[in-house]
Each structure stands twice: as structure tokens, then as C-alpha cells.
Image (tube, helix red, strand yellow):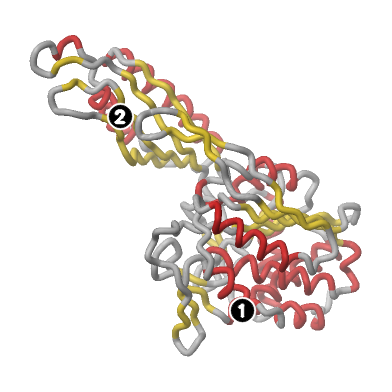
Amino acid sequence: MTLPVSALDIAASAPMRAQVESWSAVNSGSRNLDGLAVVADLLANAYAVLPGDVRLLDATPGETVDAEGIVQPVVFGRNLHVCVRPSAPVQLLLTGHMDTVFGIDHPFQTVVPLENGAILNGPGCADMKGGIALMLAALIGVEASPLASRIGYEVVINSDEEIGSPGSASLIADAARGKLAALTYEPALPDGTLAGARPGSGNFSIIITGRAAHAGRNPEDGRNAVVAAADLALRLSRARRQGLAINPAKIDGGGPNNIVPDRAILRVNLRPALPGDQAIAVALIDRLIAEVAAEHEVSIHLHGGFGRPPKPVDARAEKLFTLVERSATDLGIAIGRKATGGVCDGNNIAACGVPVVDTMGARGGAIHSIDEYLIVDSLAERARLSTLVMLRLAESGL
């Protein structure tokens, strides 16, 4: 197809910078339900310009294990869902997240322009208020094209991506059903490089229950839960291998020095590179828990799971990457691709059998830190790219 200049120019002319500054000025840490509610309303109003159904949906309730080893209920913010032309011949999924890693009490709360305004430093500017803004701009460009009637799409902007999407995973899976392809708006690297293959990720809270006893009078009657947790952490750490990263991250538990501790909670993250590595990880956890429970005479309860399946680049994903890369070249945009150790909602989408490129967002860097920055020119650049990719999918598919 010839470059649809009018549609691309419309996408590039959207007020993306102002939106990023406005949305990033509101704290939307994953646990800040009030801030998330404000941002969700702002996004719903912005996305209402699209010709479809725009709704804010309640999240699926979740659970967490507290420092005492008690399973507690957790609620998450509402998720934005947009549905446009569900009967069109080409169906796409676009996803993003409104939450950030910066809590309401974090010192990083304001947006500051740098380098004469060419850079924005602010919480969530790149990850990913910028991506949400340029996603909307790209869709506005699509709507201005004669090909718009061929394209149907769902948009999901969730409130809990930074904590693994526990309350939105089912919504994403439902939205992925029947889609030709998906685009997710995580930030690209500063030079525009896309993330290719990703590992999976599993987060676990392992609750160890022992037996309390006096540390001096009858310690032999106790069963030390902290020691058992430490032993399990060491065994897990020693079991890491090529294709399976394991990070024992924290042990909660213990108390006064004169009491044998009867409760401990080990927090651990595992990242399998491929589905086969995930199966190995599941068997490994089960085996090591059984060994430690027997040797230390404690009971152990496993809480958690693999919320992010591994995301290798299969043949259909390769076709989508090729389309994106070719479109970037046609627009004079330098672009590359490399595997990454990070995970995102793209993992969940790929596990549904839908090819996805999950770093279609703005160029930026230092995400998850107070130095996070967005390259302002990349908003228009990447909006044009997304519009062109979607129109090419409408015209020729994969």
C-alpha cells in the first residue's frame, strides 16, 4: 500500500504531550485505588472520541499473603475496556496499563521538562502514559482512513500490570480471543529497539509452619520455621540454571531471641525462558518443598503461581515483527529487536495464541526510577508507526 499520509498526519497531530503531562501528574501507583480511579476517568473521557463502547470494568478480586502468613483479600482498580466494530473482518487487540510503580508516598510525583522540552522526566511518562496517549492517537488516525471499516478492535488499559495483572488477566484473555494480532504499548528502548522474546514469571509466597519452643529450656522440641525457610531459599538459589532464573527475595518471620520461631514466609520469583522450563520449575518447587518439609519436620503451603507465561517468538509473531519493522523502515524510523528478561501483558496475550509486539510505546528510559524519561518526539513518530501497522493489517493481514 502507498503511505496513507493523511491518516498518519492526523495521528501525529494529536495532543499527546499535554495528555502525558496531565495523566502523569496524577499518582496511579498500583495500590493507590483513589489515584487509579481519577486516571481511569480521565482515560475513559479521552478514549470516548472513538466510535465504540467505552466502559470501566471492575477487576477480579485477588489474594495476598501478609507478613504473618495469613492470606488476605485484595482489590484492584477498574480497567478501561473499549470495543469498536466487533463484526469487522480484521480484529485487533491493543493494550496498555494506567498504573505505575510509584506509590502515593513516593517522592517522585511531578513532571519536569528537560533539554528545552525535548524530554519529559516524570512518573509513568514513558511507562506508560506516553504509550496510552500515542495508542489513542494511532486509533484516531485509523478512524480517519478509508480502511477503518475493515478494522475492529478492543482496547484494554488495566490498573495492575506492574504487579502482574492478577485482577485483569481474565479480561485480557477474553479480549484476545479471535484476534488476528495484538499491539501493547510498553516503552521501547531510547533508540527504538523492540522487545522480542520474553521469559515467563512466577511469584510465590511459601508459608512455613513449625513449632514454637523455649530457645534455652527445650529448643529440641521446637521446629524452626526461619531455618527451614532459609534452607529452602538456598536450595532454590542453587537450582537456578540456563533457562530458569530463580530469585529468593525475602523472608518474613521470627520474633524474640528466646523463642524458636514457628512461622516464616519465603517470597521467591522464578523466570522460565520457555514453556518446558516452566514445567521444570513447577516440579522443582514441589520437590524441594517436600524435601525441606520432611527434613525440618515443618508443614509448608505454597501460594502463588506463574502469572506470566514464557513468550518465545513463534512463526506468526515473527510475521508481525517483520510487518512492524518494515513499516518503520518505510517511515524512516530506525528500529531493532532483542530478547529481554522483563515480562508484561504481552506474555499473557501470546499465551492465548495471538501474535503480539509489546513495545509499541514511546521511546524512553530509566523506567521504574526517579530518572524515568520520555523522548517527546517519539510520541508522533510511534503514533504514525502504529497507524501504518494497523492499516497494513487491515489491508493484507499477516
Q: Earlier in the sequence, mark 2 or mark 1?
A: 1
Neighbour tally class for label 2: few under 14, some 14-19, many 20 plus, Cα within 10 Å: some
* x 17%, y 22%: residue: 259
**How far separated are the C-alphas under marks 2 and 1?**
51 Å
Q: Is residue 38 left or right of residue 247?
A: right
* x 75%, y 83%: residue: 9
Q: Circle 2 is placed at which residue position?
A: 235
Q: Amino acid at mark 1?
A: Ala
Please tell me whether residue 259 is drawn above or below residue 77 in the rendered image.
Answer: above
Helix, strand or loop under label 2? helix
Q: Is residue 353 left or right of residue 19?
A: right
Percent across and percent down for residue 47 are 74, 65
Please tell me whether residue 143 is drawn above or below residue 235 in the rendered image.
Answer: below
- Asked where in the image residue 290 lies, by quadrant, the reply is top left
Q: Circle 1 is placed at which residue position?
A: 18
Percent across and percent down for residue 135 are 68, 67
Question: Which quadrant would the N terminus be assigned to in this image?
Answer: bottom right
